[in-house]
Image (cartoon, rainbow, N blue to C red):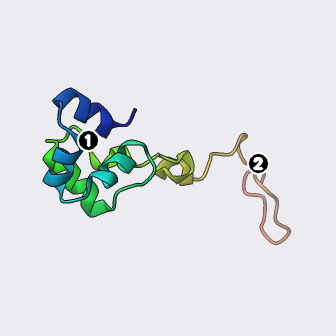
């Protein structure tokens, strides 16, 4: 059940009444409730405003773990890096 469907059932508002309040056709509300369409950002913001936040804009987006900011950070190495010898630099640890 979508948050919109839950809200409309709880408020006992019909699809037609809600559609009129957000400026769309009843069929659009039906499709939104069944998850057949996703609202534009502008419509999602209007729905959030009309429902007093009961159906937030974020409810229309499925979070993809690959898109989260922390998934983009480089992962730490499994082991500490070992110092590498360079042929042109003297070993400062063993003078």
Answer above or below: position of 34 versus 22. above
- Write down the quadrant of residue 24 in the picture: bottom left
Residue at position x 36%, y 43% in the image: 33
The structure residue drawn at horizontal position 76% and vertical position 48%, both measured from the top left corner, is 82
Which of label 2 and label 1 is nearer to you? Answer: 1
Is residue 85 or residue 75 the one in the foreground? 75
Q: Looking at this rendering, what residue extends furthest in the right direction? A: 87
Residue 55: mark: 1
SS state under label 1: loop
State the mark number for residue 82: 2
Residue 7, image quadrant: top left
Q: Residue at x 25, y 63 (%)?
A: 42
Residue at the extreme top of the image, as rendered:
10
> Marks 2 and 1, how far apart in space?
53 Å
Query: Picture coordinates of residue 81 (x, y %)?
Result: 73, 48
Q: Most extreme residue toward the bottom, as rendered? A: 88
Left or right: residue 47 versus residue 29 is left
Whole-percent x and y of residue 78? 71, 40
42 left or right of 75 in image: left
Label 2 sits on a secondary structure element that is loop
Q: Which residue is located at x 72 percent, y 57 percent? A: 92
């Amino acid at each position: 059940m979508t948050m919109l469907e839950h809200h409309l059932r709880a408020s006992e508002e019909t699809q037609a009444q809600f559609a009129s309040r957000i400026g769309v056709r009843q069929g659009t509300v039906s499709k939104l409730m069944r998850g057949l369409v996703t609202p534009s950002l502008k419509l999602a913001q209007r729905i959030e405003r009309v429902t007093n936040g009961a159906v937030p804009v974020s409810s229309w987006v499925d979070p993809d773990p690959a898109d989260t900011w922390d998934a983009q950070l480089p992962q730490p190495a499994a082991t500490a890096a070992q110092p590498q010898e360079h042929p042109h630099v003297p070993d400062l640890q063993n003078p």
